[in-house]
Image (cartoon, rainbow, N blue to C red):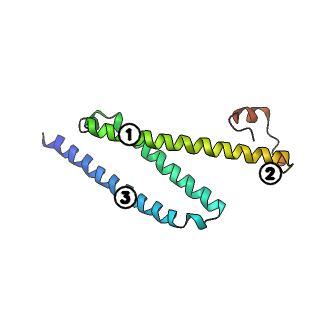
Amino acid sequence: MPTQHGRILASLSSLSEWIDMQRKAMEMFREINSSADQADRLALVLIIRQAFQHMIKTLKAFDQWLNDPFILNYITKDMLIDVWNTTYKILNELLELDIRHTKAVKEVAEKMIREGKLPPMMELRGASEEERSRRSFFPL
């Protein structure tokens, strides 16, 4: 029995480490956000990608929890409802962002094409038919 308790305590300790890591990430992104308006386009791309990577890592961890019978023993229905409500809100915000951003990119690209202002790199990119078919969602 003490061995099982030891494993549980070790797991709880790793949860404390995860919480500390997430709090540090929150602080880091809070600091990044405070100067994001002054960042150039490359810096913005890099911080957005860094945020996406952290979100993906967090989502994967949540998904692993929902597949772990050990963890599920300690998750109440109220906790699951909280996770669902927050997930639903984040999902809707993400979908709204995706629709808004995709529409804006499409409009800018169409305007540039009509005006004959293709970016120089597009003219250099002689993509093969196979490569073009892989980019079916955004053919530029």
User: Mark 2 or mark 1, which has the lower sequence index?
Assistant: 1
Numbered disc in front, either 1 or 3: 1
Identify residue for label 1: 85
Where disc 1 sits, the SS reads helix
At label 1, counting other C-alpha atoms closer than 10 Å, the crowd grade (few under 14, some 14-19, many 20 or more) is: few
Q: Which residue is mark 2?
A: 121
- Labelled pair 2, 1 in contact (Cβ < 8 Å): no
Q: Earlier in the sequence, mark 1 or mark 3?
A: 3
Q: Is residue 47 above or below residue 65?
A: below
Asked whether the residues under the numbered discs 2 and 3 touch, taking CB atoms below 8 Å apart as contact, a structural biologist would say no
Percent x, y of residue 122: 80, 47
Q: Is residue 30 left or right of residue 2?
A: right
In which quadrant of the rendered view does residue 35 lie? bottom right
Q: Nearer the viewer, residue 136 or 79?
A: 79
Position in image of residue 120 (x %, y %): 83, 53
| Amino acid marked by disc 2 | Met
Choose between 95 and 55: the one closer to the eye. Answer: 95
Work out which quarter of the rendered image holds the N terminus and state it.
Answer: top left
In this view, the residue in front, 123 or 103, is 103
Which of the two discs, 2 and 3, labels the residue nearer the N terminus?
3
Q: Which image quadrant is residue 48 in? A: bottom right
Residue drawn at x 13%, y 43% as measured from the top left: 2
Q: Amino acid at mark 3?
A: Arg
Alpha carbon distance from label 1 to label 3: 21 Å
Q: CA distance from mark 2 to mark 1?
A: 43 Å
Q: Which residue is mark 3?
A: 23
Q: Give SS at disc 3.
A: helix
Q: Quadrant of the C terminus?
A: top right
